[in-house]
Amino acid sequence: MAIPRAELCERFRRIPMTAVCDAIYRGGREERVLPSYLRPLFPTQRIVGIARTVLGVPIAEHLPWDEGVGRIQSYLRMFDGIQPDDVLVSVNRDSPVGHFGELTGNAAQVHGCVGVILDGNLRDTDGLRDIGLQVFYRDMSPLNAIGRWEMAATQVPVTIGDVEIHPGDVIHADFDGILVIPAGEAEQVLADSETVMAGEDLVREDMRRGLSPAEGLEKHGYI
């Protein structure tokens, strides 16, 4: 029986990202880790959720404000479809404007978004810190996007670095990095990760009693 998404995300949130990576590696799968240039607004905050993707593009010929407002409407309406435990994954190339900020952050959060992966430029960081919404971002820009940027598509596969992210994939992100778990593998990876974490708990207890790392690995199979 499929695990409900809320339960799946909550159980993953209890597991350090490194333990999830170890479980994937031990299972013979590829660890899909995003580039380390994406840095967290809150270094100590972990996010786990379901990918909701956005692909943004620059507007080649900048538009006057009123025309730009019309062009950005599809992006603004996208926020109405956000569901609890979503992670917004927004990919934006060759665009100097800010692609996510406090006002859109409030809209995302009120619909249940737990965080943002922004391969693009962040703005309004004071407001985002005030509401506690975690964003992993590439760069900063104070520039308004209206008339200079628009959403080309949503809920389509997007690529960051050499990792393709599909809508519905699980995003597991903390200070150590950002991991993408394909939707079809998520339940098995969760079970394997919980096994790894339980094993590492035993190793940790033995390390604190003076057992050597080599002895811990031989005894428990983890290090």
Image: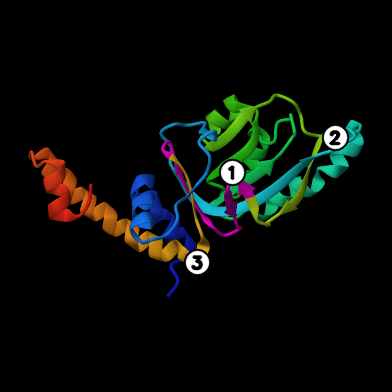
SS label for mark 2: loop
Give the magenta range. 159-176
Category of crowding for the residue at label 1, using alpha-carbon neighbours closer than 10 angstroms: few (below 14), some (14–19), many (at least 20): few
User: For numbered disc 1, what is the local secondary structure?
Assistant: loop
Point out the frontmost of discs 2 and 1. 1
Q: Mark 2 points at which residue?
A: 147
Residue 30 visible: yes
**Disc 3: which residue:** 184
Q: Is 2 contained in the magenta span? A: no
Q: Does the magenta stretch include residue 161?
A: yes
At x 60%, y 45%, the residue is 160
Q: Name the mark nearer the viewer: 1 or 3.
A: 1
Q: Which amino acid does label 2 sit on?
A: Gly
Find the residue positioned furthest to the bottom: 1
Residue 103's quadrant in the figure? top right
Name the outermost residue toward the left. Answer: 210
Circle 2 Cα neighbour tier, 10 Å, few/some/many (<14 / 14–19 / ≥20): many
The residues tagged by marks 3 and 2 sit, at their Cα atoms, a distance apart of 38 Å
Specify which label sits upstream in the sequence, 3 or 2: 2
